[in-house]
Image (tube, rainbow, N blue to C red):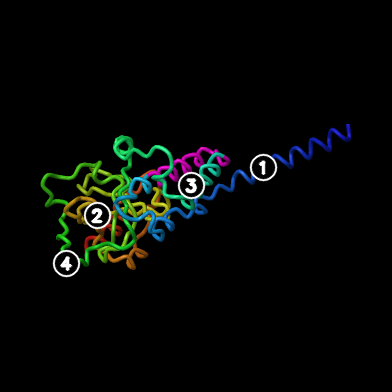
Amino acid sequence: MKMFKTLLIAAVIGTIGANQAAAECEIADARLEEAIQQNPRFRGPANSQSVRDLRSLRDAALTLRSYGRHEDCERLLANIRELIAGPPMGSLGDNDEEEADKQIAATEPKIRRGASSGNRSKKDAKPLIRIDELTPGLRTDEMIGAEVRSSDDKIVGEVRNIVFGTKDGRDYAIIASGGFFTTGKDSIVVPIRSLKVTQDRSSFFLPIVKDVMKTVPVMPDQDYKWLADPAWRARNDALFDKR
C-alpha cells in the first residue's frame, strides 16, 4: 500500500509538471513577425505566399492555445521555427501558387501586410484617397486583413473587424496593433471616415504618426460594450478627428 501511495503521488506530480509544461505555449517564441521584417528571404512579392502560409500557421497555433491544446500548439510552433530557419519554402514539396491563391481567397482575413517601412516618400507614389471619395465603394473583404499604417508610413497593424450601423452614424475599424496583429488587448478603435487608403486599396492610413499611437486608448472590452458608451467613443474619436 505504501508503494502504491508513493507511485500515485509521483504520478500526480508528473501530471502537474506535464500540465505546467503544456501551458507554456508561447507564440512570441516563434518570433515570426521579426523574421518577416528582418529576413530578406521573406520580403518581396515572390515570397508573399510563404509569408501568408507562415501567418496562417501562427493563427492556427493561437486557435489551439485558446482551446487549451497547449502541446499541439507547441508542436505547431516548432514547425513554424523550422520553416523560418530552413530552406526557402518554395523548395519544399508542392507549392502551386495558383492553387494556394484559391485556398487563400476562401479564407478570412486576407493577410496583405507589408514591411515595416512603406514607400510614400517615393516620387511616383500616388496620392491617398479618402474613404468617402472612393468609386466604387469599399467592400468589407477589401478591408479585413488589410495593413494599416501611420501618417508617417510606418506599419501599425491590420484591420481585424468592422462595426457598422451605430445610431450616430459612426462606423469603426478594429485595428489589431499588437505584436501578432491579433484582435485582443492591443486593438484600437478607429473611425472609418478618418482613414485614407492607397489607390490600389492595399494599405489604410491613420491620420496620426506612429509615435502618437501611445496616446490612443486600446479597445476597453472584447464584448463591444464600449459601443454603448458615448463618452468613451467621443474621447477616442477626437484623437483621429482633430488631425
Ranked by sequence position, the earlier of labels 1 and 2 is: 1
* Mark 2 → mark 3, Cα distance in angstroms: 28 Å
User: Label 1, label 2: how many angstroms apart (C-alpha)?
Assistant: 44 Å
**Residue depicted at x 32% and y 67%:** 212
Residue flagged by tag 1: what amino acid is it?
Ala
Q: Is residue 127 left or right of residue 61?
A: left
Residue tagged by mark 2? 204
Point out the tag, 4 or 3, that comes first from the N-terminus: 3
At mark 4, the secondary structure is loop
Q: Which residues are magenta?
A: 53-71
Choose the circle earlier in sequence order: 1 or 3.
1
Left or right: 133, with 94 as reference point? left
Q: Which residue is mark 4?
A: 123
Q: Is residue 96 left or right of residue 127?
A: right
Question: Local crowd at mark 3 within 10 Å, few (<14), some, or many (≥20)?
Answer: many
Say which residue label 3 marks. Answer: 80
Q: Secondary structure at mark 3?
A: helix
Q: Which residue is mark 1?
A: 18
**Amino acid bearing label 3:** Ile
Magenta span has 196?
A: no
